[in-house]
Amino acid sequence: MKLQPTEIPLPYVRANQAGMVIIILLAIALQQPVLILALWAIQLISLWQGIRSNLIVQLAAPFLRNRIAGAPTEARELQRFNGAIAVILLTIANVCFWYEESSVWGYVAAGMVALAAFIALCGFCVGCFLYYQFKRLRRR
């Protein structure tokens, strides 16, 4: 099965979501905002260059080879929308970390990304819901 350029295999999407949850939870547990900065860079590059440039996906790809052929896909446009939300929230988190007295808010903003990614792993995509609501409102 040849993928359309507008489709992303769901195993790649899930790997990225799981990676975000793990990195953010590690950052919170270890009190290491530098991990959130690294995640921001990974997601920003992915937003700019596409999912195949995502370091998390690149690390997971060898384990996903057998799952890619025939896997369900997600629209690239939808993934970019979700990625943009994640980058915005991670940017807010990093700005909060810049000002030490508001670092708690940085973890809250990053935690929102982790929560949304975890919920998506469980089957409900918050970003997808927002995307379709936004599209519906634009049609009016």
Image (cartoon, grey):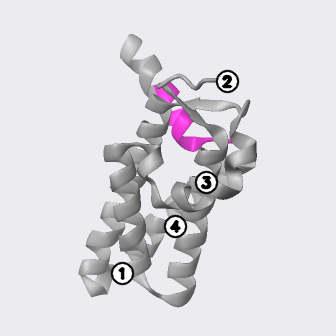
How far, Cα to Cα, is label 2 from label 3?
17 Å
Q: Residue at x 57, y 42 (%)?
A: 126
How far, Cα to Cα, is label 4 from label 1?
12 Å
> Residue 73, can we see it?
yes
Q: Residues within 10 Å of mark 1 (few under 14, many from 20)?
A: some
For label 4, the residue is: 111
Magenta-drawn segment: 123-133
**Predominant SS along the magenta part:** helix
Mark 4: amino acid: Gly
Disc 2 is placed on an element classified as loop
Residue 129 percent coordinates (x, y): 56, 34
Mark 3: amino acid: Ala
Tag 1–tag 3 contact (CB < 8 Å): no
Residue 140 vs 122, above or below: the answer is above
How far, Cα to Cα, is label 1 from label 3?
33 Å
- Quarter of the picture holding the N terminus: top right
Q: Which mark is residue 13?
A: none
For label 3, the residue is: 61
Disc 1 is placed on an element classified as helix
Disc 4 is placed on an element classified as helix
- Between discs 1 and 2, the one toward the N terminus: 2
- Between discs 4 and 2, the one toward the N terminus: 2
Res 48 quadrant in image = top left
Residue 65 vs 38, above or below: the answer is above
Q: Which mark is residue 1?
A: 2
How far, Cα to Cα, is label 3 from label 4?
26 Å
Q: Residue at x 47, y 25 (%)?
A: 5
Q: Residue at x 29, y 86 (%)?
A: 101
- Residue closest to the eye, 86 or 53: 53
Residue 16 vs 134, above or below: the answer is below
